[in-house]
Image (cartoon, helix red, strand yellow):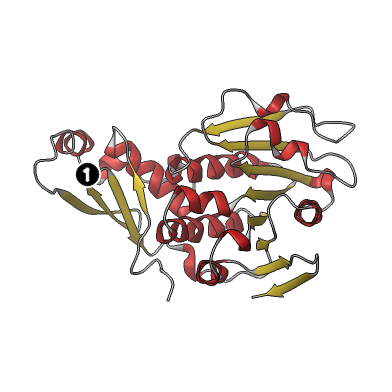
Amino acid sequence: MGPNNETNPPSFNYGDSPSTGVIRAVAWFKGVEPTALTPLQDVIDVDALDALFNQPEETDLSVSFEYDECVVEVTNDGTITIQGASDAGSRELDQETNVLFLAPSSSHSEEEGCDDLLSAVPTSRANVLGVTYESPGTNRLSTWEFEEETPARISLINVGDFTRSSASRPSKNAHPPERIEVNTVLDPSDLTTLGIRISEQLSEWGSTDEQPVVCFHSLTDLLEATELNRAFRFLHLLTRRLSSAGAIAHFHLDPEACDEKTVETLRPLFDAVLEIDEDGTWSMCVQ
């Protein structure tokens, strides 16, 4: 049986400031901007909270409190754990917005399937977000091909310590978009920052008329950077955040690089599974 959000609540790293970490983590958990939350100072003494955890880890220490319909626990191992009524796991989805895309990595079929999934809506009416663990030399811009006009906006989040921007890499499109935004998450295991970067981009696009379309490349790399239970909890929240933003997203996973149990554990998180076998045969299963 795979992990679930009741027995394995999501956890976040808070860095040097527990109070700031609580605000950012709860905002992402609920899918809102930090400014939409109740001021944390109205709930707990922020200075006292930060001072309490600015101590040597001589003994285990934790503090729990309620904050904006969430139960928040802060511990001195550097983590924040969240539970609460705002968990999006019970939301009903009315369309196939999150797709698990099973295909051998770097194959022609994978690239072709990715292009088809990106074309779920007319490209000119799409804001495209690419999350990639690839080096800038092989980034998504160099593999995407858009059938119609280029997207209204393209944003890239490069995960990994790369030294040069992928924005300098030309795409195959004859008319690149006027603005390509590039962000970086240096530590592949820092799922908190990655989740926040994605959420911030979706929020920025919330006032536009275009459809958010997301390519996450790839879960294979994500699973190399962290253990399965943690990846499950991260994806449990991320897929719901994408759905609440009205995004259409697909997540690449190479089934040859992981065992069947891993695939079966992750499968329930998605609305549909698109699979391309080694012979190039396509099959779609709506969950």
In the image, taking residue 103 as reference, residue 163 lies left or right, namely left
Q: Position of residue 162 (x, y in %)?
A: 56, 28
- Residue positioned 63% across, 69% down in the render: 271
Please name the residue that numbered disc 1 is placed on. 44
In the image, taking residue 121 as reference, residue 242 lies left or right, namely left
Hey, which quadrant is residue 278 in on the image?
bottom right
Q: Is residue 7 visible?
A: yes
On screen, 57 above or below 220? above
- Residue positioned 84% across, 51% down in the render: 122
On screen, 9 above or below 18? below
- Three-letter amino acid code of the residue under disc 1: Ile
Query: Helix, strand or loop at disc 1?
Result: loop
Q: Is residue 95 visible?
A: no
- Residue positioned 67% across, 43% down in the render: 129
* Quarter of the figure that contains the N terminus: bottom left
Nearer the observer, 287 or 47 = 287
Q: Position of residue 35 (x, y in %)?
A: 44, 39
In the image, taking residue 235 as reference, residue 150 lies left or right, namely right
On screen, 91 above or below 231? below
Q: Position of residue 139 (x, y in %)?
A: 69, 37
Hey, which quadrant is residue 254 in on the image?
bottom right
Total marks drawn? 1
Farthest-out residue, left:
58
* Quarter of the figure that contains the C terminus: bottom right
Query: Could you classify mark 1 by the number of other residues whose Cα lies within 10 Å: few (under 14), some (14-19), or many (20 or more)?
Result: some
Nearer the observer, 267 or 31 = 267
Q: Position of residue 22 (x, y in %)?
A: 33, 44
- Residue positioned 72% across, 49% down in the render: 106
In the image, taking residue 193 as reference, residue 109 lies left or right, namely right
